[in-house]
Image (cartoon, helix red, strand yellow):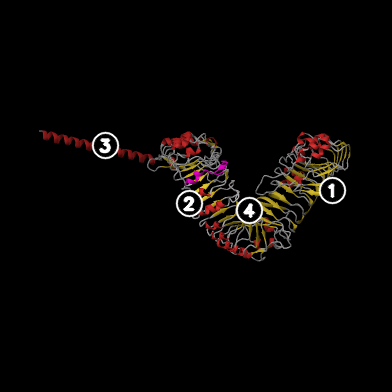
Amino acid sequence: MAIRKIILLLLIVSLLSLFLKLLLVEATSTTVNSTDADLSKGWGCIEGERKALLEFKHGIIDPLGRLSSWIGADCCKWKGVECNNQTGNVVKVDLRNRDFSYLGRLSGTIPNFLGSFERLRHLDLSNAGFGGMIPPHLGNLSQLRFLHVNGSPLRVSNLNWLSGLSFLKYLDLWTVDLSKATTSWTQAVNMLPSLLELQLSGSQLSDFPHHSNPFVNLTSLLVLDLSYNDFDTTLPSWLFNISTLRDLYLNSAGIKGPIPLVYLQSLGNLVTLDLSINGIGSEGSIELVNGLSICCNNSLKVLKLRNSGLRGELPDSLGNFNNLRFLDLTGNSIGGPLPNSIQHLTNLEILCLGGNSISGPIPMGIGNMLRMKKLDLSENLMNGTIPKIIGQLRELTEMYLSSNSWEGEISEIHFSNLTKLEYFSLHLSPKTKKQPFRFHVKPEWIPPFSLVSIDISNCYVSPKFLSSNWLTTQKRLDRIVLENVGMSDTIPEWLWKLDISYLDLSRNQLHGKLPDAISFSLKADMVNLSFDRLVGRLPLWFNVSWLFLRNNLFSGPIPFNIGHSSSLQVLDVSGNLLNGRIPSSMNKLRRLYAMDLSNNQLSGVIPKNWNNLHGLNALDLSKNKLSGGIPGWICSLSLDVLKLSENNLSGELSPSLPNCTCTSLDLGNNRFSGEISKWIGERTSSLKQLRLRGNMFRGDIPKRLCRLSHLHILDLALNNLSGSIPQCLGDLIALRSVTSSYIEFDDDEVQTSYSDNMELVMKGQNRVYESILPIVHLIDLSSNNLWGEIPEGITNLTTLGTLNLS
């Protein structure tokens, strides 16, 4: 019986086990079928995460519809979203603005609930346009490996939330405001033991601790970017203990020198080092290059030390960098010749040595650097001939040899194999020698390259160079500078058909007429045809910003419809033979901020309807035949320079003149009358140069002139002034120190400035001062009816160069 009971019990257990297995299979089958059905309906992602993403979408402004694909049930198919294939969890959100366009940016704040995507491994919001505080809830993304949240005006209150991202490998907070975390950023980053790349460029950090290594946990760090911060300190020694470092970016970070060479010994894996725009230089600081050549001679590929204050001569060890691809030492105080060892840099592709004091010739060994793509030796003290072997650098795309003292010539042999050349610059200083440097190529020679930019100045090219094959075969030219090169030709029509942005053919003997209208399909930043011999009517110019046509032989009236040249910002047609009235349509040149019509034969009155020229900064109408008075609108503008001298203007000065904010005012040699004191007002306090000579002003010299603290040129000669010389003239502050009256425009690329100039009488001779005008200190009160004693205080004007009281 017992045996039967045991057998029966085992049978019941077996049946029960089999029943449970059948139930489990059925349940699994039902689940799978249900999941397949859901996927067939488009439900591929977690519903809660889909709703969160939609809430995120609805909370931002998306002007270009970048998130237009965020519709439908399966968020895994949305642009910028990726999911786990098995679980459906969102693992990647990539909303970066790939083309960096402003219009493509989103607008809004980063929501807190992004921290609820517990399986998220990749989050990229770089340059997406978000602002405000980065939510610390991102610290809940414990599976995150990649975090790029950068761009101004994002900010943080602290970085403590980083401690929750222990698996993070890539962290980029570029231009995020970390100023409130500047004293604790190293401790926070040290909590990321898996970190491979750390990018905190432009994050307003100022604290770079020098105590024991705060990055002790970062044993795998490969890339460290702390550029564009303001540490204002020397480099801490612990930084060089991160032996895994491959790329180190500290450019423009307020780093001071010197850097002890012993620090460099552990950086044997360094591939990229950028210390540009810092103050690491001192006497002999070029030894930094020597130290790097010992520790990193096999690994280093990119070395950037531009504008870092290096001094000394380049060492022979420079040639030890076996794998160097990029070397930038621009803008230092490096002297001496180039070492012959430079020929061993056979892998070098970029060599930038401009803006130093390097002397001597180009070494012949440069011909061994066959991978060279960019060569910049500009702005040095180099001399000798340019070696023909430079024409063997077949990979060369950019060659800059400007501002040296080259001798001899450059010919087609120098260019024979440069099939990839796109940028060429040979701008030299004006020579006093009888034999200037020659750019000698045969007119029939067709170059093997297609240039984008050519810059040749103060050399000698053939008179018909504009018509040579050298130029006519170039179809990609965007920038042409051929200044003072001895050309004497007409300007060919093909030139106006180029999509050119910068054209300078000034200081030649170019002649002939220009087309009635010249238009560029793309906007040209500058056209300069000054100091040539061009004749005929002044053309209309379209899509040109800076236009310089001074000192030619243009005649006839200014086009009445010149207002159609609406792109003009600078217009200089001085020194021509233009006549007739100034057209009123100039009022339509709303972008104009400098206009020089001086030294022509213009007549009539100054137009009274130029109220739209709100940005006008400098106006020069001097040396014409203008009559009438000064219209009231002139002082409603923000003029810095106003020159109306050498005309037939008359009458008492406009009641609006007290409102002028000029720094330079020249009304000399007209027929103005009345008293000066009536219009010297409080808003004229910025005056630096005041020239009223050769008019019919009467009355006393106003004591208000003594309040002009910036005044360093005062010329009231040849008037009918009377009374005594004010005792307070000895209080003129600017006549005790050097002042500046330059008016610089904002565009650094064009580097075009309006330099004020003024004609002054020195020792009985009229002289025009321009470049040194800021340091000319003068008081001329001669040929008036003044009486009394000379003020003793004038002896206190220690920088006064000329005083004329005769």
Residue 7 left/right relative to 523: left
* Residue on which disc 4 sits: 356
Q: Which of the marked residues, 2 or 1, is nearer the chain's N terminus?
A: 2
x then y, percent, for residue 756: 75, 46
x then y, percent, for residue 283: 60, 50
Q: Which of the marked residues, 2 or 3, is nearer the chain's N terminus?
A: 3
Instruction: Look at the numbered discs 2 and 3 and tell me whether their residues touch, using CB distance below 8 Å.
Output: no
Considering depth in this image, is 497 or 619 the residue closer to the camera?
A: 619
Label 1 is placed on what type of residue? Lys
Looking at the rendered structure, which numbered label has been put on residue 525? none
* Residue on which disc 2 sits: 268
Residue 674 magenta-highlighted: no
Q: Which of the marked residues, 4 or 1, is nearer the chain's N terminus?
A: 4
Q: Which of the marked residues, 1 or 3, is nearer the chain's N terminus?
A: 3
* Residue on which disc 3 sits: 23
* Residue on which disc 1 sits: 763
The CA distance from mark 2 to mark 3 is 64 Å
Instruction: Look at the numbered discs 4 and 3 and tell me whether their residues touch, using CB distance below 8 Å.
Output: no
Label 4 is placed on what type of residue? Asn
Tag 2, which secondary structure? loop
Tag 4, which secondary structure? loop
Label 1 Cα neighbours within 10 Å, binned few <14 / some 14-19 / many ≥20: few
Label 3 is placed on what type of residue? Leu
Label 3 Cα neighbours within 10 Å, binned few <14 / some 14-19 / many ≥20: few
Residue 443 left/right relative to 346: right
Residue 358 vertical position relative to residue 52 in the rendered view, above or below: below
Quadrant of the frame with the N terminus: top left
Residue 613 left/right relative to 764: left
x then y, percent, for residue 544: 68, 49
x then y, percent, for residue 36: 36, 41
Quadrant of the frame with the C terminus: top right
